[in-house]
Structures are given as structure tokens and as C-alpha cells.
Image (cartoon, coloured by chain):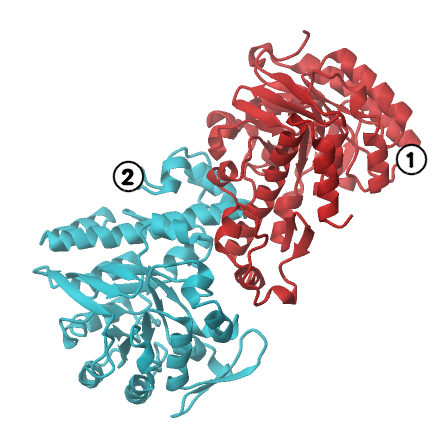
Chain colours: A cyan, B red
Amino acid sequence: MKGMSEFFSFELLATDPSGARAGRLHTPHGVVDTPIFMPVGTQATVKAMTPAELEQVGAQIILNNTYHLLLRPGPDLIVRFGGVHRFMNWDRPILTDSGGYQIFSLGSLCKITEEGALFQSHIDGSRHFLSPEQAIRVQEQLGSDIMMQLDECPPGGADGGHVRRAMELSLRWAARCQAARDPEKSDRALFGIMQGGTHESLRRKSAAALVAMEFDGYAIGGLSVGESRDSMLSVLSYAPELLPLDKPRYLMGVGKPEDIVDGVRSGVDMFDCVLPTRNARNGQLFTRFGAFNIKRAGNRDDPSPIDHECGCETCQHYSRAYLRHLFINREILGIRLMTLHNLFYYLSLSREMRAAIIAGKFLDFYRDFFQARGG
Amino acid sequence: MKGMSEFFSFELLATDPSGARAGRLHTPHGVVDTPIFMPVGTQATVKAMTPAELEQVGAQIILNNTYHLLLRPGPDLIVRFGGVHRFMNWDRPILTDSGGYQIFSLGSLCKITEEGALFQSHIDGSRHFLSPEQAIRVQEQLGSDIMMQLDECPPGGADGGHVRRAMELSLRWAARCQAARDPEKSDRALFGIMQGGTHESLRRKSAAALVAMEFDGYAIGGLSVGESRDSMLSVLSYAPELLPLDKPRYLMGVGKPEDIVDGVRSGVDMFDCVLPTRNARNGQLFTRFGAFNIKRAGNRDDPSPIDHECGCETCQHYSRAYLRHLFINREILGIRLMTLHNLFYYLSLSREMRAAIIAGKFLDFYRDFFQARGG
């Protein structure tokens, strides 16, 4: 089992007739029930939340961004604190991205070669180089439970040649990431990342090569980069099935609640996205009936909670009128209460899908989910 | 007992040989142990904190600003929500200022006449008028437990004539506030405010006239407006004694920890100030040993908490290095954790002073307090 972690495993508990899966990730920091949404904690903090609040909303695993932590406070400092778990006071599992996606988002500040990515810090313009080997080393220093390979993720509008070259480069980097793992840190899992954009032949080639390398899990990358919802659904109609049944599947950067529900229906187990946290800071709230903005005038004197049936602390204690008052006055408490609600909504959605899958009724859930939002 | 509340009382429990007092305020929303620091919740939120966190740090009463709530969301809306307690989900006592201090801080946007204050909103420039009668009506609408009279608080550098005229106008407004109380809302207390700047003769005249009007409590206003610490201490050396022993004494807008300790020594029972919350947002932390800024380079890799002996959640779980990381990256969690610590410090200080007074050892506490900060 070359390169695979001894302390990480995936247990497939149930597969719904639809193809949706329920399972368990076993990691050095505990168990994660899948399907699962992972809140994004870019700078070793899920924005505006304490670890206790993350547990309260049902978060079981969070994501940290290697690029940001590489620049500030730097992995050397985090090593001295015993890893990012202790640094940020979160003792459940952490997945780290490789840093690549954010580096490539820098555009002209970044240059990709066979060797790796040369980039300039968005903070102070300082020059850095990230190779596949260094991406692994930094993630090992951070002490994450699930590391991601360095990959090249082309933008949504990239032409076929670019998408193919990025997929092929990502495969070579995948092999280098595997080879770079420290045998003494075998408790951390490493996931390979499928690329290939919306091209089925490229996706198939990418998946086959990655599976042959035997990763602890597999991500579907290269989506949620500006393509249409139909394009994404088209990839989801075949891509998850290209991956082993007995390994976790992670759809990176996805997404809206409806995209996650479609992802689960397609057999995906893990998701991450900044939407619930970022949109809360812009006043957008997610509910069973769709999303709405707290700013809208109708909320000004509305004594009802965001959602009467929601069990989160915000909906137990605060009116839309108060939340709107806080938001309009740019009060931090407003951001806190709305972030808490949105994360609770995303994690509740994960729990409900899991229960439906285990009951063999995911298609009923799926129908009800889209009916409630009038779609 | 003309104009005094039947549902509000002050119980003096102990007076230390120094003159420091320990007591209890009985209000419609429960009991407050004095001496007490009141966190400032300007816009119906103590910035960055939930009500549950305020209880956790030991807050027993908070202050709301009438000026801000008058403009947004407006008292009519708050009335429909059953008062500011329910609007903001805080069920312990609330003190409201009259709105005057903030209106006069608007400078050229404000014009004071015998009748009241004409002012323009800092938000949209709209024109408003606040009379003593309206200040009472708005505070009754908000449903606060302790209302403050409308007063004129001249700036620190005002000349003697201005200070005298403001004191005399404040007395006439005090009488109008008394007369304006709704007999059906007699559960709310009303405090008079002593003015007179740093002029002892004016302070004496102000106190005597207010005491004759029989308020539920008395505030010392017109300090913490830019005067020197020596000037403030000079006023504190005689002003509290001008007020009845059996009524609570409130030193408005004070202050730094050392100013509060001196205020208690002078026989003051209640304090409010934005320092612990505002300075947390600027990275300044209060400790037994004085204040320091989290930004300073020495904190970059410091694994110790703000204060090893502090019992707050922040000091239990987070290092100075992590707090500095959050602060430098402008993360809301940093503001939250530092606000929590600062409020815990201020409320712990209140509790420690109270225990020392009850034990008759306030002067020992006082000496130790200033020795710890090397002063």
C-alpha cells in the first residue's frame, strides 16, 4: 500500500439506490461522518467563529489554507506550537489544501514551471517557490490530517490544450507528492486531485493514473471555477464513478446547497466552500427555502427568526429585525450570528442527507429539497 | 418620594475605612452587585459579544446609548419588540444614557437652547430635536432599568462661564426630566447628573440642588472629557461625599482601570467606559501589570496566554502568538477573544474590589493594585 496512511481509513456504511454514499472517515483526530461539509478556516480560523461554536453547529472537520499559513505566521512557527490544531485550539480533523489553487489565483504574480510554482506574496510582494515536495513538507509541518497534492487548476475558460497540460502536470506532481511523504509522518492522509476540466476523456485519464498511484482519497478538482451549473452536473454524472468505491471522494470548492446535494447524489462524500461564511458577512442567509439577504426592507420590523424550524442559536434567540439592525450598523455580532446560522444550515444539510442515505430514501430527500425551494 | 421608583433600590452593604462602598442595586431585571463596571452596548450590542458571553465574563448590567438607538432602529420599533432587552436578548439590567453627551459631541451639527438640543444625524444629516421630556420618553420606550436625565456636558477645556451655565441648565433639565416621568412606568429608575467641571463651588451647588429633587441615584458627569488625571482625582476627593449615602453613585465614562480603582476609593459605585471593548479592537489588552498591545513583535512566537493567572476563556485556550496572528490578519475572532479578555479583566476588578471592601481591606487591595503595575 505504497504511500497510504496506516492511521486513516474510509468506511463505507451505506449506498443509496441513487448512488449517494454514507460513510465514516477515521483520522488521527477522530471520526468524520460523511457526506460532510467542511467549513473553510483560511488563516487558522473559520472566520468569526470559535472552535466551540464550530462544534456546536456540528462541524467535524475544517479546512485550512496552506498558502495563507505559509506566508503568515509561517509553518516554522506553527511547528513550534505543536501544529495548527494546537495553534488554533481545534482538536478535530483538519484538511489542508496544497496552496496551489490560491497561488494560481494570483495571476501575473505567479509563474508555473515543471518544477513548481514561483509566486509573489499578496501581502508584501516577497518571492516564494512552492514545489510538490515543499507543498507536502509544509502540510506535514502544519500537522493536518488530510493533505492535498499540489495540482494545477486552470481557470474556467481555459482552452483544451491548457486543461490537458495542467492535468498531465498535475499527475506528475501527484507522483512527486507521493514520493515526498515523510515515512515518519504516515498518520496523515494524502489525497490525489483529478483534473481535466469538462473534458470526459481527460477526466478518465486523470482518474485512472491517480488510482494507480493509490492515494488515501481522491478529489475532483477543476470545478467551481466559473463553469455553468450544467457543465458541473455533466462532470458529476461520470467523474465520481471513475474513483474507487472504498476511498473518500472530495468535490473541491463546492458549493451552493443545491450543488452539494447534487454532488452527494453523484456519489461524493466531502465538500468545502467559503459561501456560508463569506456570504454571511455580506448579509446572505441560507435556508430550506433558498437564500435571502438580511438587508431587504421587509426584514426591518420582522420579529421572526431566519427560519422557524432551524435549531441554531441564532434562530432560537434573535429576530430578523435585530439581525438587520446589526448588519446595517456593521456590528460584528451580526456577522457572528449569521455565520453561525449559515454553517448550522450547511452541517444540518449534511446530517439530513446522511440520514436519508442510511434509510435508503435519498431520492425522496432530493425531491423534497428542490421542491421546498420551488425548483 | 416624588418621582422615585418603587421597583428600584440601593442597599449599602459595607463601607470600608477608606470610604469605598459595597452594595446592591435592586432593579426590575435583577440584582447588581456594586461596585460594578458596566460594559457599553452602544447600538443594542456590546461590540463583538453575545449576551451569553457577557454573562460568562460576569457582566451584571450594560449601558445602551439612546442617541444611537433613537436614530437606528428607532424607539418605535423597539417598543414593538417589547423593549431593548428582548430586542437584543439580554435579560439583565440595562442603563441608558440620555443621548445628550453624544449629541453634544457632534459639535457644529448640534445647537443647544433652553428648550433642548437640535441636532443633525451623523448617519444621514436628518434634523432631530431632543428635549428633556423626549429624552425620558425615549428611554421609557427603550425599557431601560436606569434612565439618565438630559444634561449638558461641556468639553474639557470649557471656560468657567460655560461650565456654570451648563450646570445650571442641567439642573433645570433635571427638574423637567423628573416631571416628565410616566407614572405608569415607575419601575424604571432615574438618575440626576452632577455637573460643574473642576470647580468645587459649582459641583457643590449642582449636588445640593439635585439631592433636593430626590433622584433614584446620582451620577458625576463632566469628567473623562479630556481633563488631567490630577484634575479628576481632585474632583473625586470631594464630589461623591456631596451625594446621599443611601443612593448609588455613578461616575460616567470612567475609565482606565486605575481611574476606576480611585473612583471606588472615593465612594463611587458604578462605572462605564468603552475602553475594554474599543481598545480590544485596537489590539490593546488590560492586565494586572498594566496594558500592552498584542501587535508588539515579542508576542509573535510567545506561547503564553495574555495573563497566566487570568481565568477567562481566552487565557485558558489561546496564546499571545495566535492572538497576534489573528489581529494582524484582521480576523474577527481576534477581536472577539481580546474583547472577552478585557471585559473579564474589568469585571474581575469589580469583583475583587467588592470582596476587599466587604473584608474591610480595600486599602491593601489598593496598594497591591498600584504596586503590581509598578506605580
Foreground pick, B295 / B155: B295
Side of A292 where A3 appears, left or right: left
Where is residue A200 shown, x and y percent of the image?
Answer: 19, 80
Q: Quadrant of the N terminus of chain A?
A: bottom left
**Secondary structure found at label 2:** loop
Q: Residue furthest left?
A: A17
- Please give the residue where the numbered disc 1 appears in the rendered image: B159
- Numbered circle sitting on residue A309: 2
Dot 1 alpha-carbon crowd within 10 angstroms: few under 14, some 14 to 19, many 20 or more: few
**Secondary structure found at label 1:** loop
Dot 2 alpha-carbon crowd within 10 angstroms: few under 14, some 14 to 19, many 20 or more: few
Q: Decide if residue B38 is in sight here.
A: no
Identify which amino acid the numbered label 2 is placed on: Glu
Subunit under mark 2: A
In the figure, B185 relative to A120: above or below?
A: above
Side of A280 where B314 appears, left or right: right
Identify which amino acid the numbered label 1 is placed on: Asp
Where is residue B126 shown, x and y percent of the image?
Answer: 66, 38
Foreground pick, B224 / B297: B297
In the figure, B149 relative to A329: above or below?
A: above
In the figure, B302 relative to B348: above or below?
A: below
Q: Residue furthest bottom?
A: A114
Q: Decide if residue B49 is in sight here.
A: yes
